[in-house]
């Protein structure tokens, strides 16, 4: 069995099916998922060939190889870079190390031979069984259980969008829990029903009147959760503050596999419901601001009616504004019906 014969024995259509399921379930980049699936199939075929088993062509599903199977970096390079410019043996070895770090395989080296044992996700062992749809619910942010996963989610996405790595999960955990301790009504999450993990969040932040001037300054100077700035320029208002007129949408984020039309619409409708609740605490709310940063939601911003108010001269970000009354009057299903939401590109 040679690497160049893989596509003959395990067609690309079958490979793509496994890659799609692995990509969605394990949070891998598509490139790593492709490499893992090709390596898995190759080691299975190689083991069957070495044991003299009759190979049925083509394979329709992958079984887990029994124990470890030898595989050189040269073989892996031919598998991983078959349709691209030839990659190096070293690059293939690094890819194997990355897959091992994720827990999808175990690598052993006795000084002469590399042996690999495949550890696929349980749901991938039987690809013909349709995956159960993941149920999602909208829930209150729980600072005790949601702080760490939401901080990692925000850091992962916003560092890439802001094109720097200054957002640290450690800082975000403290910030999120601090905000929840001061006023948690405006913090809501998308939560998986099976494992209760949060996969999205929005934060409506009632802004104290002395901080309103920040909405008329460059956004980059007042970035807090997406920068290494240690002092927050925005002070939170407290319930009953009649001078509080502005809401700051400090975060709106849904993880890639869950960015779907119906989910986005339900999340936006929940923002409306939460805003109505907040009006009881802040009767004079009339302005809604946020920073336009995520290109995935640019079409959504225009559909909702947000207007650009202050363009940052240093970065391609800007403040956008919408009157609270107009936002609450929107029929989200109708407003967002024509939008096709894409995914943030993975690195």
Image (spheres, rainbow, N blue to C red):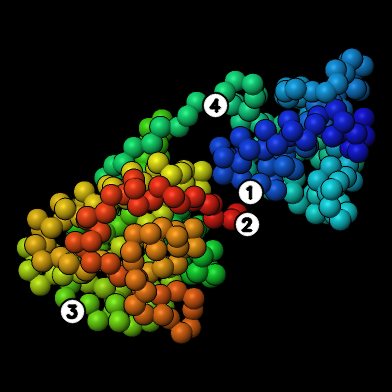
Q: Are marks 2 and 1 in contact (CB under 8 Å)?
A: yes
Q: Give the label, 4 or 3, closer to the camera.
A: 4
Q: Of the two numbered discs 4 and 2 on the same chain, state the one appearing first in sequence.
A: 4
Q: Split into 4 quadrants, where in the image is the C terminus?
A: bottom right
Q: Label 1: state its secondary structure.
A: loop
Q: Is residue 288 left or right of residue 132?
A: left
Q: Callout 1 environment at 10 Å: few (<14), some (14 to 19), or many (20+)?
A: some
Whether 232 is drawn above or below 136: the answer is below
Q: Which residue is mark 4?
A: 131
The residue sitting at 34% across, 59% down in the picture is: 304
Q: Is residue 266 left or right of residue 40?
A: left
Q: Callout 3 environment at 10 Å: few (<14), some (14 to 19), or many (20+)?
A: some
Q: CA separation, marks 4 and 1? A: 20 Å
Q: Which residue is mark 3?
A: 210
Q: Is residue 237 visible?
A: no
- Picture coordinates of residue 257, whole percent (x, y): 51, 43
Residue 29's disc is 1
Q: Of the two numbered discs 4 and 1 on the same chain, state the one appearing first in sequence.
A: 1
């Amino acid at each position: 069995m040679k690497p160049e014969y893989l596509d003959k024995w395990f067609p690309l259509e079958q490979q793509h099916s496994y890659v799609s399921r692995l990509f969605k379930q394990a949070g891998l980049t598509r490139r790593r998922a492709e490499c893992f699936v090709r390596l898995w199939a190759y080691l299975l075929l190689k083991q069957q060939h070495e044991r003299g088993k009759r190979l049925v062509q083509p394979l329709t599903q992958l079984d887990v190889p029994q124990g470890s199977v030898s595989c050189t970096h040269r073989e892996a390079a031919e598998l991983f870079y078959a349709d691209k410019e030839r990659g190096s043996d070293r690059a293939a070895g690094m890819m194997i190390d990355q897959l091992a770090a994720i827990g999808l395989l175990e690598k052993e080296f006795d000084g002469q031979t590399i042996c690999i044992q495949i550890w696929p996700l349980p749901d991938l062992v039987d690809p013909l069984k349709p995956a159960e749809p993941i149920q999602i619910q909208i829930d209150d942010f729980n600072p005790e259980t949601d702080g760490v996963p939401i901080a990692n989610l925000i850091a992962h996405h916003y560092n890439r969008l802001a094109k720097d790595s200054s957002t640290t999960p450690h800082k975000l955990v403290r910030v999120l829990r601090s905000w929840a301790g001061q006023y948690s009504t405006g913090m809501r999450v998308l939560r998986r029903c099976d494992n209760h993990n949060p996969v999205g969040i929005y934060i409506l932040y009632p802004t104290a009147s002395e901080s309103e001037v920040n909405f008329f300054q460059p956004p980059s100077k007042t970035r807090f959760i997406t920068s290494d700035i240690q002092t927050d320029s925005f002070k939170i208002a407290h319930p009953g503050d009649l001078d509080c007129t502005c809401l700051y949408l400090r975060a709106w984020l849904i993880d890639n596999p869950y960015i779907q039309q119906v989910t986005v619409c339900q999340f936006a409708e929940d923002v409306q419901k939460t805003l109505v609740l907040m009006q009881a605490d802040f009767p004079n709310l009339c302005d809604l601001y946020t920073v336009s940063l995520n290109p995935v939601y640019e079409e959504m911003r225009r559909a909702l009616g947000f207007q650009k108010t202050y363009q940052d001269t240093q970065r391609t970000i800007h403040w956008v504004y919408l009157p609270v009354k107009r936002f609450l009057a929107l029929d989200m299903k109708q407003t967002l019906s024509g939008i096709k939401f894409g995914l943030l590109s993975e690195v």
